């Protein structure tokens, strides 16, 4: 039997862990091992509520600039804020 169509599944993934943040930094900026540790520490000190999608969006803002990504981590929520159209559902509440 061939099934044609689409199945939507919603899964709660939770917020990014410091481990995930550190390793995502390394994937975007190969060779920046020490900076990845510093980024994860700064991110943890700044916020605990950031998704991996927001991290990816943030790193795309600083594609070729790991120093700028590190220097602006305190602005991560501001820089990755999603604009929602009128009538859209609000963001999930913070934990």
Image (cartoon, grey):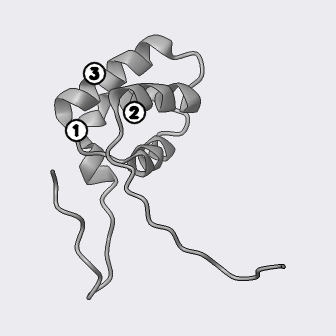
**Label total for image:** 3
Q: Which residue is mark 2?
A: 69
Q: Quick one: 50 or 11, which is closer to the camera?
A: 11
Q: Give the vertical position of 77 relative to 69 (above or below).
A: below
Asked which secondary structure carries label 2, the reply is: helix
Comparing labels 3 and 2, the label whose residue is closer to the camera: 3
Q: Quadrant of the N terminus?
A: bottom right
Q: Give the vertical position of 66 relative to 60 (above or below).
A: above
Between the residue at mark 3 and the residue at mark 1, the CA separation in whole angstroms equals: 11 Å
For marks 3 and 1, the one nearer the N-term is 3
Asked which secondary structure carries label 1, the reply is: loop
Q: Which residue is mark 3?
A: 41
Q: Which residue is mark 1?
A: 48
Is residue 68 visible from the viewing direction of this image? no
Asked which secondary structure carries label 3, the reply is: helix
Q: Quick one: 43 or 67, which is closer to the camera?
A: 43
């Amino acid at each position: 039997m061939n099934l044609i169509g689409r199945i939507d599944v919603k899964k709660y993934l939770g917020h990014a862990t410091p481990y995930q943040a550190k390793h995502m930094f390394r994937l975007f900026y190969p060779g920046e091992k020490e900076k990845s540790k510093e980024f994860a520490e700064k991110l943890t000190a700044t916020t605990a509520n950031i998704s991996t999608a927001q991290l990816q969006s943030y790193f795309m803002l600083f594609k070729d600039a790991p120093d700028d990504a590190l220097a602006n981590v305190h602005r991560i929520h501001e820089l990755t804020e999603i604009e929602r159209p009128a009538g859209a559902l609000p963001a999930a509440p913070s934990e």
